[in-house]
Image (cartoon, helix red, strand yellow):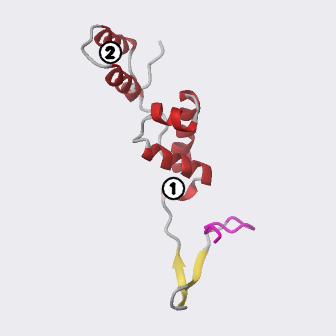
Amino acid sequence: MNMLIDKCPVCNNDLIVTSLHCNNCRTNIQGVFELAHTPLSDLSADQLQFVLTFIRCEGKFNRMEEELELSYPTLRSRFNEILRVMGFEAEPPEEEKMTSEERKAILTKLNEGQISIDEAQDLLLQKPVKIK
């Protein structure tokens, strides 16, 4: 079965559905129905597969690196592109970025055995590093 398209391939205008059919009982319904549009509707098949993998990996890029055999920068770039296509802000506001002091504090806690490697990695990946 073909994927449903929501844009006219000729003029790129929104399409409407005018007929629905049940393969089981052969019922046909005719009318004018709008297609539900969600932020996911604008994603390509590859981008949607990336989102499903992201969810399956519980949003952890380190697990996605293993599964997709891609580097963190590649994953991050694809993720940011998906955010852009969906209309969300790809970069957090400046005040949410991690300072070098915050990063050093996490690494110090790791070095002193106060937190595990996994905890440190999770903390370091929560916010991007602020470059001074």
Could you say whether the residue bearing mark 1 is in a helix, strand or loop?
A: helix
On screen, residue 57 versus residue 48, left or right, reads left
Q: Which residue is mark 1?
A: 40
Q: Which residue is mark 2?
A: 106
Asked if the stretch drawn in magenta spans residue 6, the answer is yes
Label 1 is placed on what type of residue? Answer: Leu
The majority secondary structure of the magenta stretch comes to loop
Asked if the stretch drawn in magenta spans residue 54, the answer is no
Picture layout, residue 66 above or below residue 88? above
* Residue at the left extreme of this rendering: 114
The image position of residue 20, as x and y in percent, is 55, 84
Residue 127's disc number: none
Picture layout, residue 53 above or below residue 23? above
For the N terminus, which image quadrant? bottom right
Q: Quadrant of residue 32?
A: bottom right
The image position of residue 6, as x and y in percent, is 61, 67
The reply to whether callout 2 and callout 1 are in contact (CB within 8 Å) is no
* Few, some or many residues within 10 Å of mark 1 (<14, 14–19, 20+): some
Q: Residue at x 57, y 41 (%)?
A: 81
Q: Nearer the viewer, mark 2 or mark 1?
A: 2
The image position of residue 30, as x and y in percent, is 55, 89
Label 2 is placed on what type of residue? Answer: Ile
Q: Residue at x 61, y 54 (%)?
A: 45
Q: Residue at x 54, y 59 (%)?
A: 41
Q: Upstream in the sequence, badge 2 or badge 1?
A: 1
The image position of residue 122, as x and y in percent, is 36, 27
The residue stretch that appears in magenta: 1-12
Which sits in the foreground, 109 or 16? 109
Could you say whether the residue bearing mark 2 is in a helix, strand or loop?
A: helix
On screen, residue 38 versus residue 46, left or right, reads left
